Amino acid sequence: MQPRCSASWLGVFGQGKSLLTHRIHRFYGSAATGINKHQQLICQSVLNRDSHRSACRVSFLSKSNGLVYYSVPYRSLSGMVAGLPCWPPGIFSAHDPVQQHRQRLNTWFSCLPSEERHFGPSFALDSIYVDPVIRESSIEDILRPLSESAFQTQLQTPQCPRSISVSQLFQADPSGKPVRNVILYGTVGTGKSTLIRKLVLDWCNERRADFQLIIPLSCEDLSQVSAPVSLTRLINRKYLHLRDLLPTLSNYSNILFILNSLEWMNLDFRMANTELCSDPNEAMPPPAILVNLLRGYMLPEARVLVTTRPSALKRIPRKYVGRYVEICGFSDTELQKMYFQVRLGHKDADPQETENLAEMLSRNLEHHSQLSAACFLPSYCWLTCATLHLLYYTKPGDPPMTLTGIYTTFLRLNFAGEVLDITHPSKISLMRYVARTVGKLAYEGCLSRRTRFTEDDVGKCFHVELNSEEELNLLNVFRSDAFRFFLTPCLQPGQENLYVFPIPAMQEYLAALYFVLGEHKTAMQRLGKDVSEIISKAGEDVVAVVNVLSKFLPLRIFALFNLLRVVPRLFGRVTGKNRDNIAQTMTVEMFREEDSYNDDVLDQINSSILGVEGPSQLAEGVDAGPEEAFELFPIFMGGLLSLQNRAMLEQLGCSIMNVDAFEITKALKKDLLRRSLQKLPPSELMDFLFFLYEFQNEGFAAGLVSSLRDLDLSTVRMTPLKCTVVNAVMGDTRKPVAEFNLSNCHLDPDAIHTLSPLLRRCQNVNLQMNSLGPNSCREIKDILLHPDCAITNLRLCNNPLTAEGVGFIMEGLASNSSLKNLSLLHTALGDKGAEILADHLGRNQYLEELNLAYNGIHDQAAFRLVEEAERHPTLSRVHLYFNELSDDGLQALKPVGVKVLVSLTEGTDASRHWHLILRELRANVGGWDHARISAHLTLLLRDLQQSRALTTSLWRKARIFRVETEVKRMLGRIQHGTL
């Protein structure tokens, strides 16, 4: 009887394997006694059913009994399985080790790194992958001095005749000789790991039939194995499902071993040090396994793909390498644009916004050669997209993501666990070396306000005058592997000999890291630290010996040795001063007067990525010099002290001790409290709030913002991120805010919704000149209806609310008891809006002043509105000037009981409120129709002249003449466009 199909059952801890085993044991009695949770290596049930599904065979692989088969009626097994947890789809698959291997690798390699998750679940590698340029290299290119080939290799075009595709890696060489070993090398950030992930996933999904089996091995993991082990044991340990294949592994003629990150292994190909071995089952040190694998002595039919940084290329002799391949990244702007298009166009994004972002980014890549050069490294393309996601796709409910967190995540993605040179005794982490050297260069650039550096500048920070051969070797490794990741030649004409950071914000981040880590020390501080450590270590032993001697020789001089204990304590005080200096530097850099009226830092970052509309302020080729702003520097310093960033820095080998962070924070709070009491310009206030947001310390932020009674963010472009920042920092405090000025901030309904918890705690809210429409009015209605709403004065001037929008506002006013003054000046209400106001005005019992000026209201609607206003119990003033009222209408509205402001005159005298009317005109005329306003002012001027002619009082004539003069001056300035 031929089996119809076979399926396998495999479970992890907690899925019910023991329960199923127990039920089989009870059903079949002692026949299954050899199966228990402690004995079995794996419990596997193979169901071999006939066409009628009448029977099946169950097999159990146990450690002690081997493979044991039991015949079980299919229905009986189905009954036993009933009630167990439901198995995931696809768990019952064909018992094919290679197919299982494909499924497991696909699961592992498809898993998004934590650095990708904030982009959303739609970012699978297949949907965002763009092929980088890879080119066939030679040993001559590898041995060429770095100064000759450091930057040019990134500028190779895809049309280079030596460029090849991934499918051509193992093609025969020009002489027809088969290629067995391929070394894929590239500097940090060029995309080696991503290319390997895509290669493996293509094989898993049967899009690549070049190999029967692919076995990826991590050299970093292998470097941690100290005991001898065989190749089959290594594979079995990582890929348990391949255990049945391992005895016949040598029979497979087309296996690919992928050895990732060879720089973690110190290989020795000398016969005297590494013995030859062809048996994959023989135990030996992992480096010896790799040497025999690369020699072709072990599994000669297999092929090997090695990825490594350039510094480790010489560890494999040339004769064992069939092809050298260099990955060059995106050496074409078209590849960069393609990457940005697929990255930004995720399923939750607005297609129109994504298209606009991609278009602006594309134009900036074409005109900003330095940004384009940075994006030759795919890692910097990732950083650019991550920053744009933060700036444009931040939502209130998302987990908090900070700019400092993005840059730290970016470095963790590229350098987590990376050691600069595994052969060096110090085993210094690559990122710590960068912070100590490149960070020093970045910090000195921030102090001197420079972004371009000479060879001498770079040399001083890398300590060209080295003291040992080992330090020189470290420098050479860094130059070949990571120098181009942090410093690149300037591409502006005439400045090719200067170096710049690929992205300007990276300079400020590394400067902040250098300073916060305490690497900025004077020679005396460094010497004092060394002396203190020596004395601290020796002091305990000396004091112990002295205490013993003093019992036999009671000499008072022995008491002097107790001073040894004081030295570490004194140095601790000096260290404390250093922490105070960090806090003081942070505060000074945060509140530089020369930066007070720059754009806020988020707009600066946006401009550096997407460019600015119109001509650049600085011509190409002109050094920015002292005009360069470094406002991100203190913000990054604060962000690096957050708990999340310190945890990531720990993985990079850059530890910031908890006590240091606590002392710096305590000193910083004192300095910032004094500065926060000062009134800050809007952009500087936004930077201050962003600094507190980056700090990610609610208690710290609440203590500082509690003194802020007024928030003036006028003219700051309030993006979703900025709204989230303001609400996160200010929303946790329960203290009321006296005034919140958000005029001309490009608000939209989403922004109003995000800021609503803060808005309803404010007394005076200014939302004028924001292009708010009816949808925004819905959000304002919800704020007004909230029981905790404390708004007393609401200005919605110069927004196209329309009659529909004012309907929502009046619905909110119906149950609101806090609002006293409402300004709807120039909100396109028209007669319909005035009628809606009149219909709903009686439902409110607390409004005292209503401004409806410049709304195109005619006589009849104005009369109806004023009649309702007279019935209102508290409304005492209504502004109706600059409306479409006739002369008769104006005269009819003047004598009513409610104070109606329609003109600059009251009979034969100037109005007592003429200052108020002209002040409103000055504050809002910038966004009005100048021709229409000029016509209204002409009519008001005529009224003034007529009133002056009718009055006989010289005092009144003088007062009216003063108002006339002011109106004429304003009319002239409007006509000349200077107001």
Image (cartoon, grey):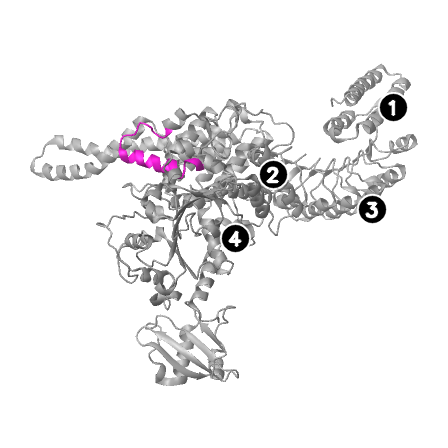
Q: Residue furthest top?
A: 954
Q: Would you say the residues marked 2 and 4 are in contact, meaning their CB atoms lie under 8 Å apart?
A: no
Which portion, as a residue range, is magenta?
A: 461-485
Dot label at residue 943: 1
Where disc 2 sits, the SS reads helix
Query: Percent position (x, y) of residue 124?
Result: 53, 54
Disc 2/disc 4 C-alpha distance (Å): 23 Å
Q: Is residue 477 magenta?
A: yes
Query: Percent position (x, y) of residue 190?
Result: 46, 43
Disc 2/disc 1 C-alpha distance (Å): 57 Å
Which amino acid type corresponds to the residue marked 2 in the rendered image? Answer: Ser
Dot label at residue 362: 2
Residue under circle 3?
839
Position of the C terminus, as image quadrant, is top right
Disc 3/disc 4 C-alpha distance (Å): 59 Å
Query: Badge 3, how many Cα within 10 Å: few under 14, some, many 20+?
Result: some
Which amino acid type corresponds to the residue marked 4 in the rendered image? Answer: Leu
Which amino acid type corresponds to the residue marked 1 in the rendered image? Answer: Asp
Dot label at residue 818: none
Q: Nearer the viewer, residue 48 or 450?
A: 48
Identify the residue shown where x is 76% and y is 23%: 977
**Res. 376 in view:** yes
- Among the two numbered marks 3 and 1 on one chain, the one whose residue lies closer to the N terminus: 3
Residue under circle 4?
125
Position of 529 with respect to 744 (left or right) is left
